[in-house]
Amino acid sequence: MIEILLIIILLVCLNILRVVKAPTTTKKDVKEVILIQERLKDFVHQRCEIVLQEPSWMIDIAYSTIGVIQDYDDEWLMIVIQKSKKEIKKVIRISQIKDIKEIKEK
C-alpha cells in the first residue's frame, strides 16, 4: 500500500517538474525572434558580431562572438569564427540572439 502511494507521489512530482520546466514564450519573445530573422537576411556571408541574451558555455561564447554568418533557417544560425589559423563553425539557436552588429572592413 505504501509503495503505491509513493509511486503516485512520484508521478505527481514529475508532472509538476515538467510543467515548471516547460519554456514559456511570450509575444515579445516571438516578435524579437522574428525581427532577428528578418535582420539575418542582410548579414549572410558578412562579418558581424553576434550578441547573446545569456552566456552559452556549451558552445564557448560568453557574451558575444565575431564571425561570418554562413547559413540560417527558422531556428538555427551557423557562424564561422576565425581563431588563429583555424576556422571554427558554431551553431547558435536564433532565439538566444539578442543583437547582431555589422563589422565594417577597414
Image (spheres, rainbow, N blue to C red):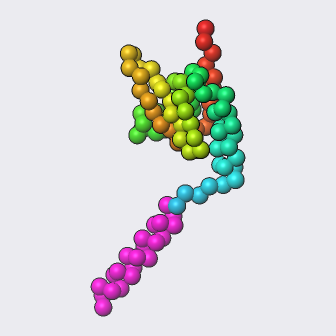
Q: Give 100 or 71, whichever is nearer the viewer.
A: 71
Q: Is residue 52 visible?
A: no
**45 is higher (above) or lower (below) than 4:** above
Q: Residue at x 40, y 76 (%)?
A: 11
Q: Looking at the image, can residue 85 be seen? A: yes
**Residue located at (57% from left, 41% from top):** 73
Q: Which residues are magenta?
A: 1-21
Magenta part, dominant SS: helix
- Image position of 93 (left or right of 86): right
In this view, the residue farthest toward the bottom is 1
- Residue 44 locus on image (x, y percent): 60, 28
Q: Seen in the image, is 6 located left or right of residue 99? A: left
How many numbered discs, if any?
0
The residue most toward the top is 106
Whether residue 4 appears in magenta in the rendering, the answer is yes
Q: Position of residue 58 (x, y in %)?
A: 40, 40
**Quarter of the image containing the C terminus?**
top right
The picture quadrant where one finds residue 43 is top right
The spot of residue 45 in percent (x, y) is 58, 24
Above or below, 45 against 105 in this view is below
Q: Is residue 58 left or right of residue 31?
A: left
Q: Name the image quarter holding the N terminus.
A: bottom left
**45 in relation to 8, above or below:** above
Find residue 50 and report its image quarter. top right
Q: Quadrant of residue 23?
A: bottom right
Residue 40 painted magenta = no
How far across and down, in percent of the image, does residue 28 sit?
Answer: 69, 49
Residue at the spot x=47%, y=66% of the render? 18
Q: Residue at x 46, y 72 (%)?
A: 15
